[in-house]
Image (cartoon, grey):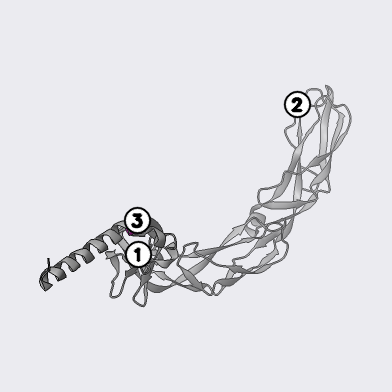
Amino acid sequence: MTFKWRESTAFRLLALFLAIVLWVYVTHQRNPILERAARVDLQQQGLPAGMVIQEIPSSVTVYYKSSKGRLALVDAGEFEARVNLAGAEKGTHSFPVRVNGPTGVEVIRVSPQRVTLSLDRIIQKAVPVTVNILGSPAQGYQRLEPVVTPPVVEARGPSQVLQEIERVAVTVDIRGTPTGIVQVRPVSTGVEGVKLHPDTVKVTIPVESLPAGTVGVKARVQGSPAAGFRVESVSASPDLVKVTGGQDLLDRLENVTTASVDIAGAAADVTKKVKIINPQGALVEPREVDVTVEIVPDTVPGENNGAVESAPASGE
């Protein structure tokens, strides 16, 4: 029996098709198509000049498939995930995520497929520099107003962020210093994406001696001497002390007082070293004086024998 030529060709084509199907089946069984997922860094391109992205996701998830053998050789770094920002304007916009994979790998999908990004314009703004001062100089000294050089710096960053920045501050510690302070200090807004020019300033804080004056000492006593005795006089040694403080304080300060000397039941002179009550905002030298309360017999019974609240020191 013989076959016609067309019938012979048809059988050959059928045999070839069956062979291909069989080959695909066997290949698939030995090296099946599998799916995988990978975290891929998200990049941007085409950002217009003078614009900045407020925030962009660091990565996306890419789902892909390939043969088992090919997948064993695939690395996440071979994928590229990008958003194209060409022509974007200020505001919040949604952008598609585009993914390119290595040869022999089919990208199925990406999650998320779109990302929402906020874009802003970069602007410049003059910002004054202020000084936060910690502590006070040494006793007897006062600070003058600080001087900052330059007093204004230029801030550069997103317009929405710079709207909230009215000033930048530097901190200088002057605790206990008897001399002026001159320091070069860094300045910063503490806000990511904002740069300052210059990023350092020179801070000068002058320190000078406070005005000083001399005032009298008013000694205080409390209690009453013994029966038949009275207070003849109250004196302080020294009876003049140096007071250092603000000029306003010195102008209105007439004297300083001591802590009270107790003379209750005394039948003889009382001498004690007592502290001077320091006026607020002032420094007194010396800090202590000797107070002497002279007590004498009361020649007129019933007179000058009561409780004594205070008596002026000699020299007032």
Residue 95 rendering spot, x and y as whole percentages: 28, 65
**Numbered label attached to residue 32:** 3
Residue 78, quarter of picture = bottom left
Sequence-first disc among 3 and 2: 3
The quarter of the picture where residue 63 lies is bottom left
Distance Cα–Cα, label 1 vs label 3: 13 Å
Magenta span covers which residues?
A: 27-36
Q: In the rendered structure, which amino acid carries the disc numbered 1? A: Val
**In the image, 268: left or right of 245?**
right
Q: Toward the viewer: 156 or 78? A: 78
Q: Amino acid at mark 3?
A: Pro
- Please tell me whether mark 1 sits on a helix, a strand or a loop: loop
Of the image marks 2 and 1, the number of the one nearer the N terminus: 1
Residue contact between numbered discs 3 and 2, judged by CB atoms under 8 Å: no
Q: Residues within 10 Å of mark 2 (few under 14, many from 20)?
A: some
Query: Which residue is the site of mark 2?
Result: 306
Residue 303 falls inside the magenta stretch: no
In-front residue for pair 198/2: 2
Quarter holding residue 90: bottom left
Residue 19 rendering spot, x and y as whole percentages: 26, 63
